[in-house]
Image (cartoon, grey):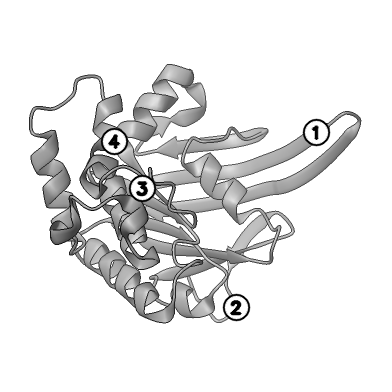
Amino acid sequence: MSMIEATNIVKTYTKGSVSTPVLCGANLSVAEGEYVAIMGASGSGKSTLLNILGCLDKPTGGQLELGGIDVLALDDDGLATLRNRRIGFVFQQFILLERTTALDNVRLPLMYADEYPPDATQRAQDSLASVALADRASHMAGELSGGEQQRVALARALISNPDVILADEPTGNLDSESTAGILEIFRRLHDDGGTIVLVTHDRMVAAHAQRVVELRDGQTVPAEGDAA
């Protein structure tokens, strides 16, 4: 089953009379349970494509389906619901509330659900446990190391049991030990059937994925040496 079908995605930014094309007919198909890395030169549009896949930005043209849903046919409320229920985001910047506990940071997405679940605290505790941070639940986010903060961000992304995890340079601010820890969590998620799309500039990080694609001239192509 296909989880993501992005077809002929075009994105052009316009400011005044100046138009800047970023994506020029990019295509990406991701199967359910697949682990895909996206690479490309700086400014190639990797983050732009990921933001479009995650319904954070709208393309100028093309088609996008997520789990069979025509994303571009949704209104803003529909997009917000889709993001909250079906997509988990992990960014290079951890985007945590530093003076809020790890537990409350993880629980935050549930506060935007249609109905706050009665088991929200337990779900947040379980999510922290899944990234080996159960013992840090009551610590303020600002008290945690960079690697721990990224694991909190990952636990937050997982709390709604999303259909797909979208990760934008998730190891970009981490040392080698913390990077290895995050990649091990991604490996376990994938082994459990999770769908992951990861943007990275690091070929060693990309090598952990099943398949690597590159963005060149605004289009996706198989990475060099990748037969997929």
**Mark 4 belongs to which amino acid?**
Leu
Residue that lies at the very extreme toward the right in this rendered image: 17
Q: Are marks 4 and 2 in contact (CB under 8 Å)?
A: no
Question: Which residue has dot 3 on it?
Answer: 2
Question: Which residue has dot 1 on it?
Answer: 14
Disc 2 element:
loop
Residue 227 located left or right of residue 146: right
**Mark 3 belongs to which amino acid?**
Ser
Nearer the viewer's eye, disc 3 or disc 2?
2
Answer few, some or many: residues within 10 Å of disc 4's Cα (few below 14, many 20 plus, some between 14 and 19). Answer: some
| Residue 18: quarter of image | top right
Q: CA distance from mark 4 to mark 2?
A: 40 Å
The mark that comes first in sequence, 3 or 4, is 3
Nearer the viewer's eye, disc 2 or disc 1?
1
Q: CA distance from mark 1 to mark 4?
A: 34 Å
Residue 124 located left or right of residue 147: left
Pick the front one: 113 or 4 = 113
The mark that comes first in sequence, 1 or 4, is 1
Nearer the viewer's eye, disc 1 or disc 4?
4
Question: Which residue has dot 2 on it?
Answer: 224
Where's residue 102, x and y in %? Answer: 25, 49
Q: CA distance from mark 3 to mark 4?
A: 29 Å
**Mark 2 belongs to which amino acid?**
Glu
Answer few, some or many: residues within 10 Å of disc 2's Cα (few below 14, many 20 plus, some between 14 and 19). Answer: few
Disc 1 element:
strand
Q: Are marks 3 and 4 in contact (CB under 8 Å)?
A: no
User: Which residue is at a point 45% across and 67% down the rendered structure image?
Assistant: 171
User: Which residue is at a point 39% across and 64% down the rendered structure image?
Assistant: 146
Question: Which residue has dot 4 on it?
Answer: 108
User: Which residue is at a point 28% across and 50% down the rendered structure image?
Assistant: 140
Q: CA distance from mark 2 to mark 1?
A: 32 Å
